[in-house]
Structures are given as structure tokens and as C-alpha cells.
């Protein structure tokens, strides 16, 4: 099931992540992170993993990370996906 509407989750506070998701073609991921040099690849892999778990194959995501832990990133992406699917 694909994303049917624009949705978001999270904040821009320190140690959090803000995720915007909207309909798109394929997976388009734009990441800005204060720790991108160190953890950018693992953040992208985690987001791709969550999308695969929820069966999302077409979506555009913008992720603004402020040093969030993996569990926070996962929770924010899951919430944005659920909202984007209209759940």
C-alpha cells in the first residue's frame, strides 16, 4: 500500500527527528542531519528497512535529524507512514 497523502511526525528539537512523507514515484529520500558524516548511511538504511516492513514502495521523504537515536527515527518514520496511509 502506498502513501496517499502528505503527513509528518516529530519535531526539530535536539535529539529528535522530523519526518515528512508524501506520495511519490519510487523511494526518494532527502536527509539533512547534524550527524550525517558519521551516521547518514545507517539512517538511510533504517528508513528503507521501515518502509519495506510497511510495504511502502512509492514515497518521497524529507528527514531533518537532530541527533535522534535509532528507536526514535524508527518511531517517527512508522508514525509518518501510518498517517500518510490514512490510518
Image (cartoon, grey):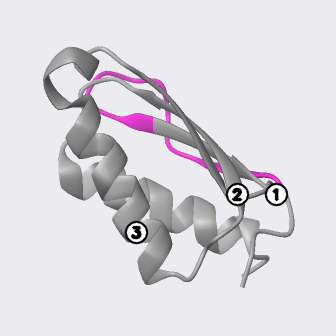
- Count of marks, rendered view: 3
Name the residue at 55% across, 43% down. 19
Find disc 1 in the rendering and name its residue. Answer: 23
Q: In 3D space, how far apart are the residues under numbered discs 3 and 2 (Cα atoms)?
A: 13 Å
Q: Residues within 10 Å of mark 1 (few under 14, many from 20)?
A: many
SS for dot 2: strand
Counting residues from the N terminus, which is met first, the one under dot 3 or under dot 2?
3
Q: Please give left or right for residue 43 compared with residue 47 in the image.
A: left
Residue where numbered disc 3 is placed: 50
Which residue is disc 2 drawn over? 59
Front residue of this view, candidates 11 and 19: 19
Magenta-drawn stretch, dominant element (helix, strand or loop): loop
Measure the alpha-carbon separation of dots 1 and 2. Answer: 5 Å
- The kind of secondary structure element at disc 3 is helix
**Whether label 1 touches label 2, CB < 8 Å:** yes
What's the residue at 85%, 69% (across, down)? 4
Picture residue at 13% right of the left edge, 22% below the top: 38
Local packing at callout 2 (Cα closer than 10 Å; few below 14, some 14-19, many 20+) is many
Q: Position of residue 54 (x, y in %)?
A: 51, 81
Front residue of this view, candidates 20 and 12:
20
Q: Which residues are magenta?
A: 6-17
- Percent position of residue 28, x then y: 63, 45
Q: Of the residues under marks 3 and 1, which one precedes in the sequence? A: 1
Amino acid at each position: 500500500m502506498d502513501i496517499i497523502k502528505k503527513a509528518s511526525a516529530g519535531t526539530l528539537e535536539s535529539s529528535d527527528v522530523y519526518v515528512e512523507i508524501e506520495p511519490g514515484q519510487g523511494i526518494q529520500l532527502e536527509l539533512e542531519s547534524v550527524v550525517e558524516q558519521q551516521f547518514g548511511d545507517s539512517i538511510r538504511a533504517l528508513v528503507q528497512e521501515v518502509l519495506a516492513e510497511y510495504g511502502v514502495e512509492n514515497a518521497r521523504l524529507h528527514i531533518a535529524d537532530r541527533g535522534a537515536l535509532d528507536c526514535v527515527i524508527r518511531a517517527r518514520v512508522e508514525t509518518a507512514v501510518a498517517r500518510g496511509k490514512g490510518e
